[in-house]
Amino acid sequence: MELIRGLHNLRPDHRGCVVTIGNFDGIHLGHQAVITQLHERAQALAVPSLIMFFEPQPAEYFRPQAMPARLMRLREKLLTLREQPIDRVLCVRFDDRVAALDAEVFIEQILRRGLDARYVVVGDDFRFGHKRRGDLDMLVRAGRQHGFDVAAMPTFRIDGERVSSTRIRAALAAGDLTTAAKLLGRPYRMCGRVAHGDKIGRQIGVPTANIALHRRHAAIQGIFAVKTSGLSAKPLAGVASIGTRPTVGGVKPLLEVHLFDFDGEIYGRHIAVDFLHKLRDERRFDSVEEMRAQIMDDIERARDYFVVRG
């Protein structure tokens, strides 16, 4: 998969492709259905497939303080897209200049001159251009005029409800990891590099891998049974905490993972954490000793979960 960072990095050999545009936060089953359709059309037309999205997301640009938590950081999105049948990803910086593009200019400069799109797949509620004036009907008319086909991806449903990033966020907030995994097509995952922490976990006999979240809000909080990839040939079971650690005066959200039956030097390693089962919410304890007792109970409950799960 080729990553193209910015419209200024488009080259003549990037012209001629099939395109889809969206946020793709989570790369859930609805997104995967779009990608599958794009891949099939790319093969039929013998041209590359391309996903286009913006950083930051347009809604984040206009209302940064009102945005819900992302399901994925940019790096996590790119890592997941590499597992999909996609040839190219175009990541466009959303700034004042892009926000001011009229819908017609967006079509002419990006879809026609920049990409020479042969086929465009979008959601049925897709809006684009300055003040969101462009819509599916405008795109269809432009396609008829300029010679590219436009397809509106019908709503993808599971259990009679639309699969969406919003629905997944709600499931994660409720601790319903089973529903979240069902909509994503895989367990919910967070990735990051292991960094040095304050060593409190090691001091109380429960060493943890500390991972900075690098995001304004986390979509998930609490204590979880997890499996971690990136440290051995097989995923390692453990228990993870996402929160601010109020008992020890923490402020910034942090992901901490205690791995069962593992002892190794892992600072600087990039790992992926799959959240499988919520054990409890984070809470403040009256003492470190009380916190340690609860952590030991969390570990036993997580071990029991993996024994039952097999």
Image (tube, rainbow, N blue to C red):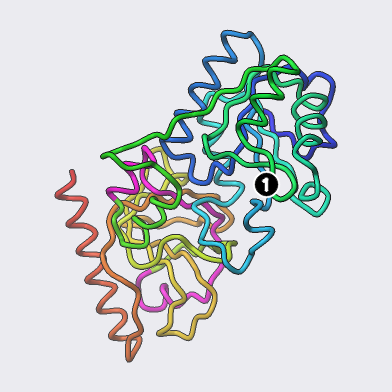
Q: Which residue is mark 1?
A: 132
Query: In front here: 169 or 74?
Result: 169
Would you place residue 55 above or below residue 298 in this image? above
Judge left or right: residue 186 versus residue 121: left
Name the kind of residue labelled 1 in the image. Arg
Mark 1, secondary structure of its residue: helix
Residue 71: image location, x then y, percent: 49, 52
Judge left or right: residue 17 versus residue 104: left
Query: Which stretch appears magenta?
Result: 178-206
Residue at the image position 69 percent from the left and 17 percent from the top: 144
Residue at the image position 39 percent from the left and 34 percent from the top: 156
Q: Residues within 10 Å of mark 1 (few under 14, many from 20)?
A: few
Residue 84: image location, x then y, percent: 51, 28
Q: Quadrant of residue 61?
A: bottom right
Judge left or right: residue 186 versus residue 69: left
Query: In front here: 246 or 193?
Result: 246
Would you place residue 297 above or below residue 33 in this image? below
Split into 4 quadrants, where in the image is the N terminus?
Answer: top right
Residue 303: image location, x then y, percent: 22, 57
Would you place residue 32 above or below residue 150 in this image? below
**Residue 305 is covered by the magenta coloring:** no
Residue 174: image location, x then y, percent: 31, 62
